[in-house]
Amino acid sequence: MAPPQPAPLLPHGVTIDWCEDNYAVQTWVAEFWNTWTSVLCAAVFLVWLCQPSPPAAGALPWLHLLFFCIFAGSAAFHGTLTWAGQLLDEVPIMAFVGFSLAVCVDNLSLQSGFKRSWWGLGPRVLAAACVIETAALTILYTLHTKAYSVFLTGVVVQAILHWPLIIYFIWRRTQWDRAALGMLAMHVGIGYSGAGLWLLDSTFCSQLKALNLHAVWHITSTLALKPWVDLLVYCRLRAAGEEPHYRMRAWGLGPSFHVSAA
């Protein structure tokens, strides 16, 4: 059997070019609307990073910094359409899905008082595993195939693996807590609607190009990630025996946590 051949690269070395016309608005920005919505979304995550969060949330609010890196990389990708820009966009995404999945696993291992079950690996081991996984996928992606499917498959598989963990946690550890279900519903409703726009833009480009749906997806994915981080924080606090209260402020975009002793 012949070895797999690298996917043909588009101009500038990228493996994918989006629906928006290149250099149609400005001569120094490849995809105008995709670039500037990425810049806007990156700035929003810096605002969320600076919001107060419960001390027991640990490092989870720093996921907003990772999201900032994703959208800063997205701006570099859409603005330049270079292979380096593409990696700045996609490598943080691969890191995020791995770290997010690791947080779900760690939340399940937590017990009251932030002790862990015997099988819990702890955040350091899980973080190291995520770094190794991201490095391995990046090497496979860049040196072996340069196929967009390598990146997309890794992201989608790990995104699917989130579901049994988060549903099990909400069922067994919170007894279908309304706050947790509300955050999950916001994430799914906004995020999956945005993913639908991404698919429409990719599938029906010639018919829908004027709508700039990929740029709209940047905004919907940003709005969907805030309740996801809040949900991970909420699950961590509940697992550790804290008594978090979640009241939506600014439609869930503001600091919404209050924690009292269990």
Image: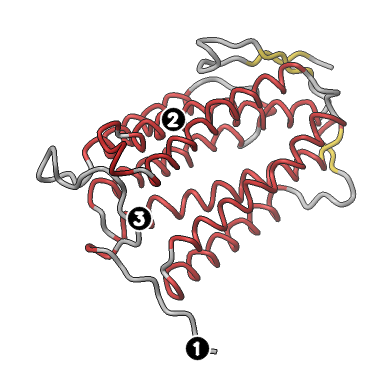
> Secondary structure beneath disc 2?
helix
**Residue linked to disc 2:** 45
Q: Residue furthest bottom?
A: 1
Viewer-side residue, 144 vs 44: 144
Mark 2 and mark 1: span between their CA atoms?
A: 45 Å
Disc 3: CA contacts within 10 A as few (<14), some (14-19) or many (>=20): many
Q: Amino acid at mark 3?
A: Gln
Q: Amino acid at mark 1?
A: Ala
Q: Residue furthest front?
A: 207
Are discs 1 and 3 less than 8 Å apart at CB?
Answer: no
Disc 1: CA contacts within 10 A as few (<14), some (14-19) or many (>=20): few
Viewer-side residue, 14 vs 205: 205
- Picture coordinates of residue 168, whole percent (x, y): 82, 36
**Residue linked to disc 3:** 86
Viewer-side residue, 160 vs 128: 160
Q: Earlier in the sequence, mark 2 or mark 1?
A: 1
Query: On the rendered image, what quadrant is the C terminus found in?
Result: top right
Q: Which numbered marker is on residue 67?
A: none
Query: On the rendered image, what quadrant is the N terminus found in?
Result: bottom right
Q: Is residue 42 left or right of residue 31?
A: right
- Picture coordinates of residue 170, whole percent (x, y): 79, 29
Residue appearing at x 32%, y 29% in the figure: 40
- Picture coordinates of residue 41, whole percent (x, y): 38, 31
**Residue linked to disc 1:** 2
The quarter holding residue 176 reads top right
Mark 1 and mark 3: span between their CA atoms?
A: 28 Å
Q: Earlier in the sequence, mark 3 or mark 2?
A: 2
Nearer to us of marks 2 and 1 is: 1
Q: Amino acid at mark 2?
A: Phe
Residue appearing at x 49%, y 37% in the figure: 195
Nearer to us of marks 3 and 2 is: 3
